[in-house]
Amino acid sequence: MPETIIIPDFSLSPRIDQVGIEERADRITKRSIKKESKVSLLKLGLSMIDLTTLEGKDSEGKVKQLCYKAKHLLDSYPSLPTVAAVCVYPSMVKTAKQSLGSSGVKVASVATAFPSGQTSLDIKLEDVRFAVEQGADEVDMVLSRGKFLAGDYNYVFDEIAAVKEVCGEARLKVILETGELVTFDKVRRASDIAMYAGADFIKTSTGKVSPAANLPVTLVMLLAIRDFYYKTGRMVGMKPAGGISKAKLALHYLMMLNEILGGDWMNNHWFRFGASSLANDLLMQLMKEKTGIYQGKDYFPID
Amino acid sequence: MMENIIAKKSPAAARVNGNSKIAEKPEKGKRLEVLKTYKIYIGGKFPRTESGRYYVAANSAGEKLANMCLSSRKDFREAVVAARTAFGDWGSRHALNRGQILYRMAEMLEGRKMQFIEELLKQDASRKLAENEANLSIDRLIYYAGWCDKFQQIFSSVNPVACSHFNFSAPEPTGVVSVIAPQNNSLIGLVSVIAPVIAGGNTCIALASYSKPLCAITFAEVLNSSDVPGGTVNILTGNPDELLPYFSNHMDVNAVVYCEKDPAGRKVIHENAALNLKRTVFYEDTNWNSKEVQSPYRIMDTQEIKTTWHPIENIGGAKAGY
């Protein structure tokens, strides 16, 4: 019997000091990292990637290619990890699952009328059910931003809880779409709602709205995760997504993660990057560290 | 060449207002001259070197001329990123437009000729030589501006083939070119090596003369005000011995231009260029004022030939004989 968690009044979620958060996030970008740490962080970063393709034009061929890339990041560089997961639309889950086979790379599926989430709860649940039946290991749902911004927190909470129930064994990531929430106060409140409603991960963005993930908003969410952990003893994962395409930026995220949540979160069970072009930049930096020569993108497979 | 130059790690104060003659106590009532801070040129902006290092450029009398950025490999890397980004735009512009922009560069240089002459005088040139060098630099830009939309026709060909194909070859820019400018002069050498590279649609990162760097940065100001898209030409100042390995081994660089006879330098370039089969271009010239150094063949030095096989119904169908 799990411990009872008391649901707080979300309208009382802590207010966030915007200037303070931005300055603290900015300070993290000013630090230097020693070479050995850099190499291990680059490899860790690779293992945390949710290699993503979420386009209307996605075809089976495209997804198969992406899965191949997920398994074979760079065959000429031995002992590289694979990425954590491949993230696709529900209709592509089966293809991805088959292509990945027993490689250990997970399949994540977006669901609940991604990216807008503007449909009825029944259809959303059906969407999730379909993804899970097809074999998704993880489900990325979108928060109902319209309801949230209108102040209907109970609806949002119940929806997440309902989706979590349908997910069953699959881990649930809740996409807040911070670019549409605008203020840090709302990001914090949405994070709290998602975590109390049962999210296994909170995720910044769909990648379809600008601004997507950035360091300050991730800091706000990491702090929410920390507070939630102190209150309930339950760990929640974090996934910044969208706009992270450079290795250096990825290292900044990892530094922040280590500083706020510590070593327990420094693995791909608790932290993910939603990205597609980041993988190649990480590979280029790893090759640069190995050979001492700056790399060019012409010499790395696109997918 | 380099005995009058001292490399230093800059104190913060010198970085903020690093220039000559400040140490001299001004006469009472005399206006203190406002001296220019020479910075580097990357991606259409004028940053200082990320390393914070500088060196003192002096003339042969040992008089301090300016503090110059002692660029690092990271500055070079930033410049390559800028050049690669700019290549998409510059390389796909139509040739006439590139010609117009090179002409515009010449116009802007003409307008600021006196400033260049003054800088050349500071760097040991006589007035006559300085004026000559400035004029020649302008004329050289005009020369290559004219060639921008003409060299393709001259060096293209329609090739006879023994099957039903229309077969033709045409030059295309090779991509990002790193250029170590001639070290023995300040302006004409730099212009003479940059102009053919960009006339052909490449983008470049140029390392200015170490001992005579002033005109290179002032030339960057000319570029910046003459419709050249940011990143097309990037200019660094610094030590060629230190930077040569990076100029030649970066995997995202497609060609290297080198103008010194130094066999050790050439060996480094040859070896590093082999990593990704960079084009290597070595110039033997010593007199950059001479007309001998300008030629459409110099544009071709950083071009690739692309051959296209286009199916046609039957050979000689157009009675053209190919």
Image (cartoon, coloured by chain):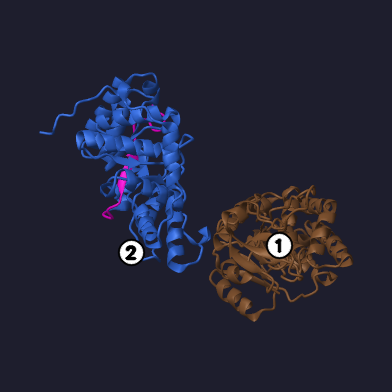
Chain colours: A blue, B brown
Residue at image location 21% in from the left, 36% down from the top: A168
Q: Which residue is mark 2?
A: A79
- How far from the left and from the top, in percent, is residue B70? 61, 62
Left or right: residue B114 versus residue A114 is right
Q: Which residue is mark 1?
A: B170
Specify the farthest residue to the left.
A1
Q: Amino acid at mark 2?
A: Ser
Q: Nearer the viewer, mark 1 or mark 2?
A: 2
Residue at image location 67% in from the left, 65% down from the top: B179
Left or right: residue B110 versus residue B66 is right
> How far, Cα to Cα, is label 1 from label 2?
44 Å
A48 vs B52, nearest the viewer:
B52
| Residue B244, quarter of the rendered image | bottom right
The part of the chain drawn in magenta is A102-117
Left or right: residue B297 versus residue A301 is right
Q: Amino acid at mark 1?
A: Ala
Please state the total of marks drawn on the protein image: 2
Output the chain of dot 2.
Answer: A
**The residue tagged with tag 2: helix, strand or loop?**
loop
Left or right: residue B320 versus residue B269 is right
Output the chain of dot 1.
Answer: B
B124 vs A212, nearest the viewer:
B124
